[in-house]
Image: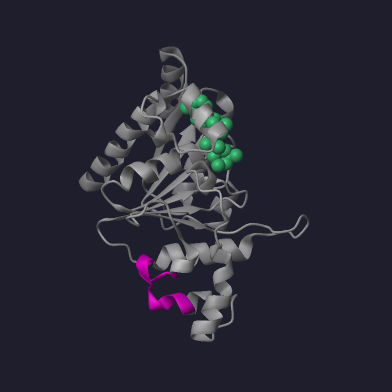
Amino acid sequence: MKIAVTGKGGVGKTTLAGTLAVILSQKYKVYAIDADPDMNLAGSLGIHKPISPISKMKDLIKERTGAEPGSSFGEVFKINPTISDLPDSLSTDYDAEGNLKILVMGTVDKGGEGCVCPASVMLKAILRNLIIKKDEIVILDMEAGIEHLGRRTAEAVDVMIIVVEPGLKSLETASRIKKLATDIGIRNVVAVINKVSSKTEEKFVQEKLGEMGVEVLGSISRDDLVVRADMEGLPLTDYPDSVALQSIEKIAGNIILKENVS
Ligand SMILES: Nc1ncnc2c1ncn2[C@@H]1O[C@H](COP(=O)(O)OP(=O)(O)OP(=O)(O)O)[C@@H](O)[C@H]1O
Ligand SMILES: [Mg+2]
């Protein structure tokens, strides 16, 4: 299963993607991919050393297949790699068992250098051609907003989760994401409501999402332990008392149920 986590800036995409990855890795083999050029997924999981990005794979492809990076990516990926075929040097293990591997799309190295397009083309090709086994899950932490939908980076995902918070701004972004995701053929677009402080707030967002025809997978409370985890640079799963963590555990269960049914 391939899952992409999207939404407006700062709504909690990385918190959700990273925490889901750790929870799901207790049962499945999980690949968490940071597809945000302003990356911080690994950091949110307590991994603070640099990870070699997928964008660096250009050299590897050339070395192994002789193909020039660029227009020939499509050709290269006809070989249909399985995710476990991707070179070990591109991922970092979260746990000693190797059940959670973290990959990074890549970033703009220098200010003014411009575009992350080559990196996102790479990632798109990898995602489209990747063969994933039944007990493997890929979770993508996407860049904020809608630009990546124009680039179709995540077009090959099975589920797109839109994170929303109480407020019209993130709901407007959600509405755009829903439309664009549907346009590029993603059928399963669902929402998670984050930073909820009251039933009134939850109901407000639920109603708006209902009007958009977006199913809600679950809600996550506003929780000081999320902020503390962020300040301490540790994964939320290190804070078992966190109510947000408990909600994300439920959401993980809902994702698995949903995929098994549909
Ligand atoms: N449930 C929550 N309760 C309290 N704070 C939260 C909650 N979820 C996220 N936050 C805080 O909100 C901020 C943004 O979270 P996060 O980095 O996960 O969002 P994001 O959508 O990935 O942001 P970006 O768009 O920059 O990638 C962080 O400081 C995080 O600690
Ligand atoms: Mg983020």
Where does the image place residue 111, in percent across and percent down from the top left?
Answer: 77, 55
Q: Is residue 139 left or right of residue 116?
A: left
Query: Is 86 colored magenta in this rendering?
Result: yes
Establish if 61 lies above or below 16. Answer: below
- Among all residues in the image, which is located at the extreme front? 96
Establish if 53 lies above or below 72. Answer: above
Q: Nearer the viewer, residue 225 or 74?
A: 225
- Among all residues in the image, which is located at the extreme right? 112
Quarter of the image where the N terminus is located: bottom left
Establish if 224 lies above or below 255. Answer: above
Residue 136: in sight, yes or no?
A: yes
Q: How many marks?
A: 0
Q: Is residue 111 left or right of residue 36?
A: right
Q: Nearer the viewer, residue 105 or 131?
A: 105
Q: Which residues, given as a range, are shown in magenta? A: 76-87
Where does the image place residue 75, in percent across and percent down from the top left?
Answer: 48, 79
Ligand 2: give its quadrant: top right
Establish if 68 lies above or below 34. Answer: below
Where does the image place residue 232, in percent across and percent down from the top left?
Answer: 54, 34
Q: Name the residue rendered at 52%, 78% in the picture.
A: 61
- Among all residues in the image, which is located at the extreme bottom? 66
Q: Name the quadrant containing residue 86.
A: bottom left
Query: Is 194 colored magenta in this rendering?
Result: no
Residue 172: in sight, yes or no?
A: no
Q: How is the image coloured?
A: one colour
Q: Name the residue rendered at 55%, 58% in the picture.
A: 51
- Among all residues in the image, which is located at the extreme left? 261
